Amino acid sequence: MVEISENLRRALHNLGLTDYEIKVYTTLLECGDSTASKLSELADVPYSKIYEVLESLEKKGWVGTEGGRPARYYPKSPITALESSRMRIEKEFKANEEIILSELLPIYEGRGFRERHDIWILRGEENILARIKYLLSNCEKELLIAAPFLTKNLLTAFLPHITYITSRGGSVKIMVPNDVNYSLIKKLSEVAEIRLKEQMFGGGIVADSREVILLLGDEGAGISFAIWSDHVGLAKFAKNYFEYLWQSSITP
């Protein structure tokens, strides 16, 4: 059986796979196509559980099946499986979100609570990218981005969300330095309005005039420090400043 690290086991658990499912999938990776009875033996999963495990893996997108007597099961690519898991998790989250907001938000608003705005200081590119993705995923109508040190990591984080926003009729404006790699500019210009600015001191992202991330760092080190806030006043100030810079920027 394939030996897997604790980090990998934890990651698979976080995606909703059980210990039995992990055993069966990794066994299929090592041994290839197999029948349920053979998998039960090789993966050390009780025969009374093997069909339940295989059915669950198939629903989650990690395993496929070929008809026959008996049926044979095969592992799907981890890339395909991860995409299936991502879509499933997002769908489940959306369904839960609708239920929670429809039932709890009226109670919250009915009690007259005063909104407490947050300001977070973020350090480390991984943490900052995670917050950027979260902000982008919540944006619906207008996205303003000033990216003084555009990297492939940032581009990867931006593109899917930008494409989704524009496909729903939203507006996306992106301002970058005039020395940014042309291929990155070309890629972004397919889904957003792009302007070049000769000098940019720091950057930021404003989503729907209600949420803002201020990005700090340098071109060599990339983004190392950021400030996030949902304070409407700060978001409005950031938007006004962006529009001021936008007026003096040029079209590539």
Image (cartoon, helix red, strand yellow):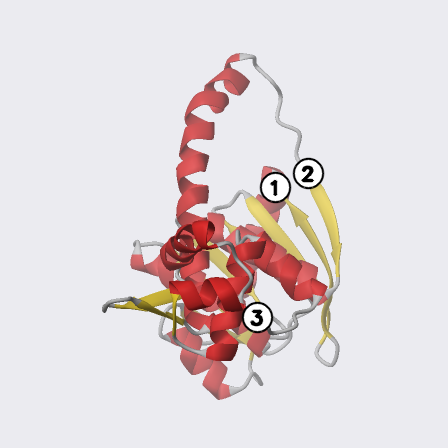
Q: Is residue 82 visible?
A: no
Please name the residue that numbered disc 1 is placed on: 230
Provide residue 1's location: percent of width, then percent of height: 59, 73
Residue type, mark 1 in image: Asp
Residue 182's disc number: none
Give the residue displayed 48% in from the left and 52% down from the top.
Answer: 137
Mark 2 and mark 3 lie on one chain; the one further toward the N terminus is: 2
Q: CA distance from mark 1 to mark 3?
A: 21 Å
- The count of marks equals 3
Give the residue displayed 53% in from the left and 51% down from the top.
Answer: 16
Give the residue displayed 41% in from the left and 50% down from the top.
Answer: 52
Q: Nearer the viewer, mark 1 or mark 3?
A: 3
Q: Label 1, secondary structure: give it.
A: loop
Up-down: is 140 above or below 129? Answer: above
Residues packed near mark 2 inside 10 Å, few (<14), some (14 to 19) or many (20 plus)? few
- Evaluate if marks 1 and 2 touch, with contact meaning CB atoms under 8 Å apart: yes
Please name the residue that numbered disc 3 is placed on: 154
Left or right of 142? Residue 133 is right
Q: Which picture quadrant has residue 187?
A: bottom left
Q: CA distance from mark 2 to mark 3?
A: 24 Å
Q: Is residue 161 visible?
A: yes
Residues packed near mark 3 inside 10 Å, few (<14), some (14 to 19) or many (20 plus)? some
Please name the residue that numbered disc 2 is placed on: 118
Mark 1 and mark 3 lie on one chain; the one further toward the N terminus is: 3
Q: Label 3, secondary structure: give it.
A: helix
Give the residue displayed 54% in from the left and 56% down from the top.
Answer: 20
Mark 1 and mark 2 lie on one chain; the one further toward the N terminus is: 2
Q: Label 2, secondary structure: give it.
A: loop
Residue type, mark 2 in image: Asp
Left or right of 120? Residue 19 is left
Residue type, mark 3 in image: Leu
Provide residue 240's location: percent of width, then percent of height: 55, 51
